[in-house]
Amino acid sequence: MPTFPTRGGLRRLGARAAAAVLLLATALALGCSLLPGPNVEQYAAERPQLDLPAFFGGTTQAWGMFQDRGGVVKRRFAVHIDGQGSGDTLELDEHFVYNDGALQQRRWHLQRAADGLWHGRADDVVGEAVGQVRGNALHWTYTLRLAVGNASYDIACDDWMFLMDEHTMINRTRMSKFGIEVGQVTLFFRKPA
């Protein structure tokens, strides 16, 4: 015959359940994921194969938006990119035009190391960006120094790019500070046909 918890046992179970729910709600509110993220290796067999210098060589256009952690679009922008490189090197000259009229330029200097990892530097990147290409995907991480008013903030970026076809790439970047997500950037790249 089954036994049932006593009234005191229900209270203890209720307290434990409440604590578990509170912990889960706190983790979700802070932007923490309880599930492991994707690994770039899982895209190794995906096609078309991404070749960074081939895709970004010449002129590329991009359109994007920044959403806060609540999903509200805070900024939209267009980017004109001029790229040069081949093999293990790539230089990107990016010109941003934001919906509020603000302009920005970023110059990336990328180099593929002997181990296959891509290393990148730009004036507003703290240290070095490090990434890996597998199949149609690039995953890289870096710290971006963002100017906001008279202050600047170092924001961790977890950046994924997926080649859809020879002319199209989609990019999604999670941005966080102290492990707490502050927003996401979504970009759509298009090469002229």
Image: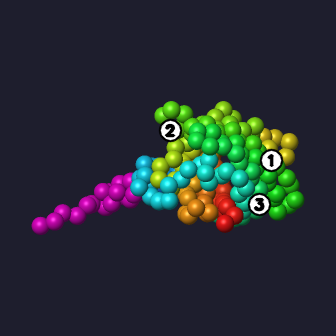
Helix, strand or loop for disc 1? strand
Residue plotted at (50% across, 38% down) = 116
Query: Marks 3 and 2: which is nearer the front?
Result: 2
Helix, strand or loop for disc 2? loop
Q: Position of residue 22 (x, y in %)?
A: 49, 55
In primary-sequence order, the first of circles 3 and 2 is 3
Q: Position of residue 64 (x, y in %)?
A: 70, 61
- Mark 3: which amino acid? Ala
- Position of 53 with respect to 145 (left or right) is left
Q: Residue furthest left?
A: 1
Residue 5 drawn in magenta: yes
Q: Position of residue 15 (x, y in %)?
A: 41, 55
Helix, strand or loop for disc 3? strand
Residue 188 drawn in magenta: no
Residue plotted at (39% across, 54% down) = 16
Report the residue marked by disc 1: 105
Q: How many marks?
A: 3
- Gap between marks 3 and 2, in whole Å? 30 Å
- Gap between marks 2 and 1, in whole Å? 28 Å
Query: Marks 2 and 1: which is nearer the front?
Result: 2
Report the residue marked by disc 2: 116
Where's the N terminus, which quadrant? bottom left
Q: Which mark is residue 78?
A: 3
In primary-sequence order, the first of circles 2 and 1 is 1
Q: How is the image coloured?
A: rainbow
Residue plotted at (72% across, 38% down) = 122
Q: Position of residue 109 (x, y in %)?
A: 69, 38
- Gap between marks 1 and 3, in whole Å? 12 Å
In primary-sequence order, the first of circles 1 and 3 is 3
The residue range painted magenta reads 1-18
**Residues at discs 3 and 2 in contact (Cβ within 8 Å):** no
